[in-house]
Image (tube, rainbow, N blue to C red):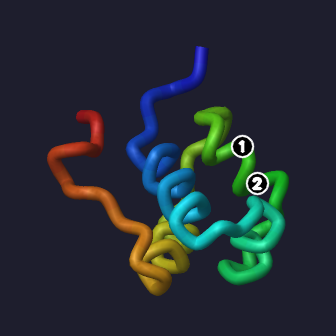
């Protein structure tokens, strides 16, 4: 079972509203598309560096959404 990761939904929403693929978003962020896929499916947690890259594009979550 995939871990609960609030960025999963945020990434999907961003890609859907901008009509781009994981590969395109990965290129924009400077993150390998395989890694991005793993974050989006909950198989991997984003690193602090990934979070900074997400924030530059406006991909953020409210602190209440982050599991304790």
Task: State whether residue 1 is above or below residue 38.
Answer: above
The number of numbered discs placed on residues in the rendered structure image is 2
Label 2: how many residues lie within 10 Å, few (<14), some (14-19) or many (20+)? some
Residue at 74%, 48% (x, y): give it.
Answer: 37
In this view, the residue in front, 21 or 54, is 21
> Where is residue 35 drawn, in percent x and y?
76, 54
**SS at mark 2 in the image:** helix
In this view, the residue in front, 43 or 15, is 15
Which quadrant holds residue 18? bottom right
Label 1: how many residues lie within 10 Å, few (<14), some (14-19) or many (20+)? some
Task: State whether residue 22 is above or below residue 4.
Answer: below
The residue at which mark 1 appears reads as: 38
Task: State whether residue 47 is above or below residue 55.
Answer: above
Task: State whether residue 18 is above or below residue 6.
Answer: below
Real-space Cα distance between discs 2 and 1?
5 Å
The numbered mark at residue 52 is none
Is 3 placed left or right of 27 in the picture? left
> Where is residue 30 drawn, in percent x and y?
74, 80
Is 2 placed left or right of 33 in the picture? left
**SS at mark 1 in the image:** helix
Residue at 51%, 26% (x, y): give it.
Answer: 3
Callout 2–callout 1 Cβ contact below 8 Å: yes
Which quadrant holds residue 28? bottom right
The residue at which mark 2 appears reads as: 35
The quadrant of the rendering that contains the N terminus is: top right
Furthest-top residue in view? 1
Residue at 54%, 78% (x, y): give it.
Answer: 53
In this view, the residue in front, 59 or 2, is 59
């Amino acid at each position: 079972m995939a871990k609960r990761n609030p960025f999963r939904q945020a990434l999907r929403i961003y890609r859907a509203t901008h009509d781009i693929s994981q590969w395109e978003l990965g290129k924009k962020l400077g993150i390998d598309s395989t890694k991005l896929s793993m974050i989006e499916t909950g198989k991997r947690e984003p690193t602090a560096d990934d979070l900074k890259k997400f924030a530059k594009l406006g991909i953020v979550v409210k602190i209440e959404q982050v599991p304790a």
